[in-house]
Amino acid sequence: MSLANSKTTNLQAIVRRPCPEIAQCALTYIERSPIHFETLKEQHRHYCETLKKLGLSVKVLPEDSSHPDSVFVEDPAVIFDEMAFLNRLGVPSRQGETLSLREHLSPYRSTHQITPPGTLEGGDVLQVDRKVFVGISKRTNLEAIEQIQIQLKSYDYEVIPLELKECLHLKTACTYIGQQTFILNPQWVRKDFFCSAFPQYKALTVHPSEPFAANTIKVGHTLITSASAPQTNQSLIAKGFSIQTLDISEVEKAEGGLTCLSLIFKEGL
Ligand code: CIR
């Protein structure tokens, strides 16, 4: 059965193949453990196939060996319907990733470059309707948040900065899963930020033994979740969510999750 959903067919994803240098990836909150590169490539292929089956056009960029973390293409840019930000990443080893993305985004959006002392990573930005939550993290600072606030004001977005505790990015801690519901890890982000912005919405919490389970991707009516979070996944199924589970064990060893592997945006606006 095809998973394609007519509502998702104007979505474009940009991904980048992983490079073997990922063995030297940046790590902030987790210990280094060996990444099995062949398995990572297979998991990445499966991720791309899943997005295609869900109706997205997937553009696969070649590997970039000069940047060990370049598979995490979510971080160097943030794309809105009206414009895109080219980010200044929060770790020096990743700052060169932005340049090579610019040519791939300019056919779709006008771009705005985040400038020093601002640092911003896409993993810290969660857009829900006209509200844009931005995590203040080790990678994203208030100077960058001010820059996006200025740019987005003319498009009527509200930018809401929020503090994170002990996790890499906002979307490590929380994503929006549809049906007026967020999923989050309350150890890393406060529920009330979301509930006061959207008083009628619910916030589900991850199973306590699965701290990384809140990083999900919603495509149409399908929610892509990680196979490393079986208990959280079970409870989402029990609540009526339609789940597609992917094994991304090797991505998780690099402190990455599902959203980090793609930039997803509407094309043909
Ligand atoms: C890093 O530390 O930058 C990478 N090893 C992981 C980036 C994950 N990206 C994301 O959560 N958006």
Image: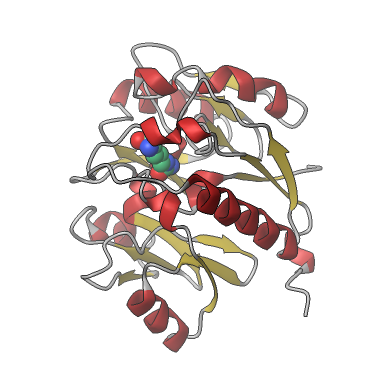
Q: Quadrant of the N terminus?
A: bottom right
Q: Quadrant of the C terminus?
A: top right
Q: Quadrant of residue 145?
A: top left
In the image shown, does 152 or 39 lie closer to the viewer? 39
**Any part of residue 129 in sight:** no
Q: Is residue 144 left or right of residue 127?
A: left
Q: Position of residue 264 (x, y in %)?
A: 63, 46
Number of marks in the image? 0
Q: Position of residue 199 (x, y in %)?
A: 35, 65
In the image shown, does 44 or 34 lie closer to the viewer? 34
Q: Is residue 133 left or right of residue 179?
A: left
Q: Quadrant of residue 14?
A: top right
Q: Quadrant of residue 234?
A: bottom left
Q: Residue at x 78, y 53 (%)?
A: 10
Going by the picture, which residue comes out furthest to the top? Answer: 116
Q: Residue at x 36, y 17 (%)?
A: 92
